[in-house]
Image (cartoon, rainbow, N blue to C red):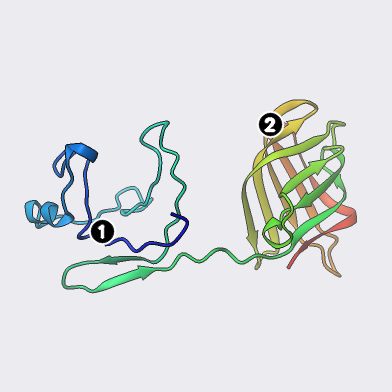
Amino acid sequence: MFTWQKWDARNGCWWDNNAELGSGGFLGVAPLSDYIANHPDATIINPNGVGGLRVTVGFASAGDTFDGNVDMVTVGVSGHGSTSYDFEPPQCQEADGNGDFHGDHGDANFRADNDGCMDGDQDTVDSDNRGDGKDFHSTHIDSIEIDNVAHTITVTGTGMSAGAPVTFIFTAIESDLVTPGWASFTFSDGYANAGSLFDGAMLLH
């Protein structure tokens, strides 16, 4: 526990939902070589495009609370060598700002602090006025995507607006010496607003 371990999947203990290799635990396990022997023509396929090999943890029952991480996964095909996948964390960079913008559905403001990986702060998106007089405060950030070519940031998550729960998408274009920047809110309650900043700035670097 609390340390990296090297697992040999080919020679390790396996079970499966069809109980071909056993049903796990006291009901039995078997090495992957047993499955290969029974299915010598088995292949890894990816018909829906979401991946032919997936690593999942803790989804079979409500009691599965194991918190684990996976790195340096090596996948080999007999006679064709192997490929190792080293999952490095995304690059951390500054991503915060605040300001006011003339929106297409009213003047609004925002505060965004989405570089918690750098400064240790909680990632947040807030607004005292979305443009319709309602405030908004994020409670959970689901994703942060930064495009360093387009100089944009997109943040998704959940929050509260005027006391009601909503999901949100916040998008902004970085401010520079030529352009003032741009911000956009889209909420699950049907309200959306977007426009160029007339004060403040959004920084992504």
Residue that mark 1 sits on? 9
The answer, for residue 12, to whether it is visible in the render is yes
Mark 1 and mark 2: Cα distance apart in space: 43 Å
Secondary structure at badge 1 equals loop
The image quadrant that residue 139 belongs to is: top right
Q: Give the amino acid type for the residue marked by disc 1 in the picture.
A: Ala
Residue 48 vs 12, above or below: the answer is above
Looking at the rendered image, the disc whose residue lies closer to the viewer, 1 or 2, is 1
Q: Which mark is residue 185?
A: none
- Residue 63: x, y in percent? 41, 33
Secondary structure at badge 2 equals strand
Q: Quadrant of the C terminus?
A: bottom right
Judged from this view, the residue extending furthest toward the right is 199
Instruction: Identify which residue is drawn at 39% across, 38% down.
Output: 59
Q: Residues within 10 Å of mark 1 (few under 14, many from 20)?
A: some
Q: Which mark is residue 166?
A: 2
| Numbered label tally | 2
Residue 45 vs 192, above or below: the answer is below
The image quadrant that residue 118 belongs to is: bottom right
Residue 159 vs 21, above or below: the answer is above
- Residue 154: x, y in percent? 66, 52
Instruction: Identify which residue is drawn at 81% across, 63% down.
Output: 175
Q: Give the amino acid type for the residue marked by disc 2 in the picture.
A: Val
Asked whether the residues under the numbered discs 1 and 2 touch, taking CB atoms below 8 Å apart as contact, a structural biologist would say no
The answer, for residue 18, to whether it is visible in the render is no
Judged from this view, the residue extending furthest toward the top is 164
Residue nearest the viewer, comparing 87 with 130? 87
Instruction: Identify which residue is drawn at 85% across, 69% down.
Output: 178
Which badge, 1 or 2, is on the more N-terminal residue? 1
